[in-house]
Image (cartoon, grey):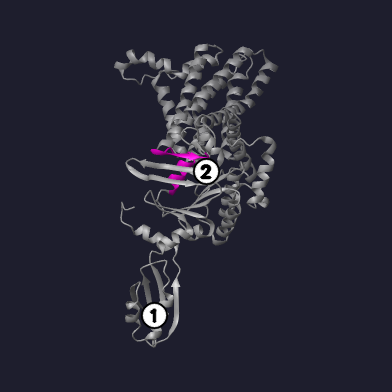
Amino acid sequence: MSAVLAIAGRELRAFFLTPGGYVIAALYMLVNGWLFVRYVFNPGELATLRPVFTFSMLAFMLICPAVTMRMISEELRLGTIETLLTSPVRSADIIFGKYLAALGFLALLLVPTLVFVVALEIYGRPDYGELACGYLGVLLAGSVYLASGILASTLTASQVVAYLITVLFWIIVLLGTKGVLQTDVLPVAWQERVGDVVLAADPTTRLIDFAIGLFDSAHVVYFGSLTLVLLIGSVGLLESRRWR
Amino acid sequence: MISAQRLTKKFGIFPAVDSVDFEIGKGEVVGFLGPNGAGKTTTIRMICGYLRPTEGRVLVDGNDMAVEPRRGQRQIGYLPESAPLYTEMRVDEYLAFRAKLFGVPPRTRGRAIGEAVERCSLGEVRRRPISQLSKGYRQRVGLAATLVHQPPILILDEPTSGLDPTQIREVRRLIRELAGNHTILLSTHNLAEVELTCDRVIILARGRVRAAGTIDQLREEAAGESRYVVESDATGASQALEALPGVGSVERAGGEGRWHRFTVTGHNGTQDLREAIAKAIAQTGGSVRELHREAPTLERLFVRIMEEPEGDT
């Protein structure tokens, strides 16, 4: 466990030693602040953070792959992966440590939004259950995006390729599953047969539930197990490098 | 401490390492010598558990690396080629990170890092980010990182490649210091390095062990024939030398004025022909102004091994 924490700690520090982390945090806060002031912070408006949560779920689709793209790719490119894989640490510890760091960074990203909660408390009567549910949804969405980003990062030594694989994958899912965007890109003949399956795999509609404060344990299981499967896949891919 | 048994690694169908066997005992300093692409790095990576062998196995301090890789890895301090480091970290941060990875308990961590820093003379750059350090310093940071968990075995892959002569001397001095209480496997394609730092040599070429033994043993093997340089003014020197028992060939190698220079090759590397050569020339009535035996070098053995045709062991 101490190895996991050592790896997570190193990764988390790396965000703050490189400009990338600050750029991401600044842009994210800027858009959130604008959304809050424009759509929430008005007389007579509901005391919720729905616009912030909905935006976050989509923004995380772009932010998370940027957070994770470096994680394994950079180690592969610099050769530091060799020092990691020859230390007495399991591949699972490496992947889990990096995942924890990424999730930690995401959580830190959400901390400034607590200002909005304070504002809601001062000027209105927010439903804390709904807010908690929203934050949980954002973190669960982030967790899946991060896990998929880590998987892509184990595939290639190029950060750009890792980023594009992840983002394109989720764009395809977003378009193909007829979720929030209500698109119909599946071939017509498939829509009936495949439609249900694809809809079940769609994360966005589930995320909307969280944003409006609808807690469904099925959603939690969905995001939790998807994260787990992606992380296990990453461990397998990392371990497979030893057999090449 | 390290035992490689019929170690084989194939990339596709190409065998990068082919049935390599060797043993390295406690406290030995062994040089792993071979041209680029001989399979040194691949073999080392299998020993350290970075790559899994296609066939054969590695025991590190009695631990089978296929069964208990982490036990073996704890015994090894491994410096990969070109010393990859996290350049955004400071030197002591990086060493602390490595100590945590290897499970050095918090109580002894500070002291272990301090010792590694002192050993590698990193005191003045301890707080500097690695990105600001020169190649020589980085190599030393890499070495210090292999020492923080105080492993009995050090495996160094080309530790001096890419360094300038002063840095090379510095790193070699460090290796010799560490040799006292570590088992060291050092890979290099530099012959002088092996002769300066190692007790024993394993020569690898095209994925196979071509020769192994102490430096003196290999020198003798290299001496399969002996070579002498003779400079004489005797007119019949060439014929007189050729007539000597044990002489294989006599070659003219220039000269100046009345002096002729010859290179004499003897059949037997262990037999010293100098006395016989001097006497033979004296009998012709000429004089000798130079006569010396060329010490057999590892380089000759190395070159001979490299020139051996494919598939010949």
Q: Does residue B77 show up?
A: yes
Q: Does residue B50 show up?
A: no
Q: In this picture, is B201 found above or below B67? A: below
Label 1: few (<14), some or many (≥20) within 10 Å? Answer: many
Sequence order check, earlier mark of 2 and 1: 2
The residue singled out by tag 1 in the image is B261
* A234 relative to B128 in the view: left or right: left
Q: In this picture, is B266 found above or below B135? A: below
At numbered mark 2, what does the secondary structure look like: helix, strand or loop?
A: loop
- Estimate the x, y position of residue A231 in percent, counting from the top left: 48, 26
Q: How many numbered marks appear? A: 2
Magenta stretch: give its range. Answer: B40-61
Kindly identify the residue that appears in the image at 63 percent across and 37 percent down: B104
Q: Nearer the viewer, mark 2 or mark 1?
A: 2
Question: Looking at this view, is B121 or B276 the one in front?
Answer: B276
At numbered mark 1, what does the secondary structure look like: helix, strand or loop?
A: strand
- Rounded to the nearest angstrom, the CA distance separating label 2 from label 1 is 51 Å
* B224 relative to A40 in the view: left or right: left
Q: Residue A114 appears in which quarter of the rendering?
A: top right
Q: In this picture, is A198 found above or below A157? A: above
The residue singled out by tag 2 in the image is B1
- Estimate the x, y position of residue B260 in percent, counting from the top left: 38, 83
Residue type at numbered disc 1: Arg
Please say if the residues under marks 2 and 1 sit with CB atoms less than 8 Å apart.
no
Q: Are marks 2 and 1 on the same chain?
A: yes
Query: Is residue B42 covered in magenta?
Result: yes
Query: Is residue A136 covered in magenta?
Result: no
